[in-house]
Image: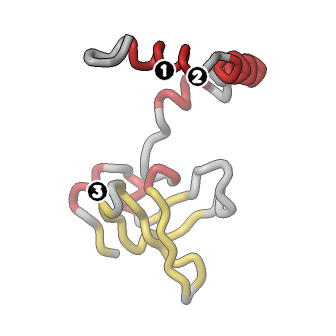
Amino acid sequence: MALDSAVTMLSPSLAEGMFTVTHPFHPLYGQQFEVLTCRHNWGEYRVAFYETPDYVRALPAAWTSLVPPDPCVVLAAGRAVFLVTDLLALTQLILSLPSRVLLHRLLGGIPGGHP
């Protein structure tokens, strides 16, 4: 198991060499795998593992037990900030505004924007 030295602080389970897929919508959710590598690639930490004996797969480390859950997600506890009905009403309001009013509001607060 080759590990990036900065990643060893991610989670105690990384030192054990095992992780669990924690992303609730991922098809491998809840399954446990052995860490093959964990490196910073594509702007984020990714963990590589054998999904099957002959197939290596990589996932964002944030989708695994190697990274603590996002505090905002934990505090929200499944609740959303906005109701879907409110967002749909806002969409209708925005769509009902003439485009010149939208441009004025968007550009009006920007220095150098047209009033």
Q: Is residue 62 rendered to the left or right of residue 53?
A: left
- Front residue of 57/22: it is 57
Residue named by callout 2: 99
Q: Is residue 34 rendered to the left or right of residue 78?
A: left
Residue 73 drawn above or below residue 28: above
Q: Secondary structure at mark 3?
A: helix
Residue occupying image coordinates x 35% and y 54%: 44
Residue occupying image coordinates x 40% and y 18%: 107
Q: Is residue 97 rendered to the left or right of residue 113?
A: right
Residue 47 drawn above or below residue 70: below
Q: Residues within 10 Å of mark 2 (few under 14, many from 20)?
A: few
Split into 4 quadrants, where in the image is the N terminus? bottom left
Q: Secondary structure at mark 1?
A: helix
Q: CA distance from mark 3 to mark 2?
A: 52 Å
Q: Position of residue 33 (x, y in %)?
A: 54, 68
Which of the marked residues, 3 or 2, is nearer the chain's N terminus?
3
Residue named by callout 3: 8
- Front residue of 32/90: it is 90
Residue named by callout 1: 103
